[in-house]
Amino acid sequence: MEIKVYRDLMGENEKWAIKTRQLLAENNCVMFNLIGGPGCGKTTLLEKMAGRLGKNLRFAVLEGDIETTRDAERLAALEIPVSQLLTGGACHLEAKMVHYALADFNLEKLDIVIVENVGNLVCPAEFDVGEKAKIAVLSVTEGEEKPLKYPLLFREAAALVLTKTDLLPHLKFNKEACLDNVRRINATLPVFPVSATQETGLTEFIAWITKQPAGLK
Amino acid sequence: MHEFSICQGLVKAILSELEKLNPPNPKLQKASVVIGRLRQIIPETLQFAYEILTKETAIAGSTIEIISAPILAKCLKCGWESEIKEHNFRCHKCGSGEIELSGGMELYLNNLTVEKESEILR
């Protein structure tokens, strides 16, 4: 005998994401979910942003890693509030983990929380952690085809940061071909080319971040 | 490997749905799951996770059927509606990138096939 069920399998995660969204809205705080492959420059981007954002806005980082507290230590050295989530092997963060980790912060005293997700272009894109927006990070050393290979992230993201642009003269990377692939997946996605080490392009990206209003999605 | 994480939710959902039936907890033969093509879930990995995660549970030995749902889009400019193929997320008629997806992100337990006659208690 066949029984019709129709039950959402993301329902449990979504419940926690909604709770987090409410908590953030009550505290007038905006949360972003930064997603990119391992080594694409997420932590370096955050280090450079900390210096600039810190002047005008109160900002904290929730670090998601499989192992080690190295990234959190790098950011804590800059005297910004950091909380480390260790997944112990899991390839992504889920809404419940993020909700509990937010208890480490005094949200009332923050304007922006950035979640640095586990380095991975696949799984983190599937999970809503209660963020205002997902931000995709892609480095020029990864190849032009990435948007086509991982379409979900580039569909889900509200912005793309193209990092390590200072390396372009040394690479075969075809920036225009990469941007064509991005537009094929998501024609309206804003793209911010950045070199964190040379500190170029950061102003534009920070302006976009600070423009995103607090409140429910 | 997020298939394992998703499968944990699936097993939990199946067990709780079976409990709602009258008589409760009939023997499960098959559960069918609908998964949108935009979700990066590998069917074989999900099948493998299901086998592992149902071991020593009341639904051990049951199978899952995975139904793939197409990526569907509507153009906000000209109203074109169709399936997105070969990762071309643009209107296939007017070329606009302003499209709204209406399918492709599905992830739900669709139905259960059980051995005996049961009725649904809600």
Image (tube, coloured by chain):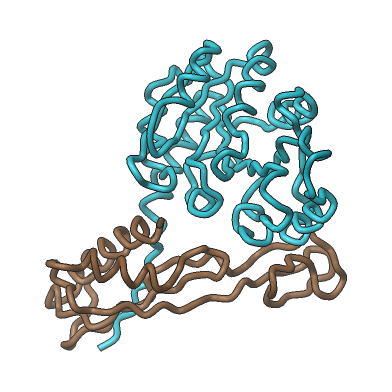
Point out the image quarter for the N terminus of chain A. Answer: bottom left
As drawn, the residue found furthest toward the front would be: A170
Q: Say which of A110 and A76 sits in front.
A: A76
Q: Position of residue A157 (x, y in %)?
A: 64, 47
Q: Which residue is rendered at x = 77% and y = 53% of the image?
A: A178
* Horizontal side, residue A169 vs residue B7: left or right: right
As drawn, the residue found furthest toward the right would be: B94
Q: Which residue is rendered at x = 70% and y = 58% of the image?
A: A145
Q: Which chain is cyan?
A: A
Q: Position of residue A87 (x, y in %)?
A: 36, 40
Q: What is the display colour for chain B? A: brown
Point out the image quarter for the C terminus of chain A. Answer: top right
* The quarter of the displayed image where residue A35 is located: top right
Q: How many marks?
A: 0
Q: Say which of A70 and B6 sits in front.
A: A70
Q: Position of residue A60 (x, y in %)?
A: 52, 21
Q: Say which of A44 and B51 sits in front.
A: A44
* Horizontal side, residue A155 vs residue B91: left or right: left
Q: Which residue is rendered at x = 75% and y = 48% of the image?
A: A189
Q: Position of residue B53 (x, y in %)?
A: 23, 64
Q: Which residue is rendered at x = 12% and y = 67% of the image?
A: B56
Instruction: Work out whether B96 lies above or below A13.
Output: below
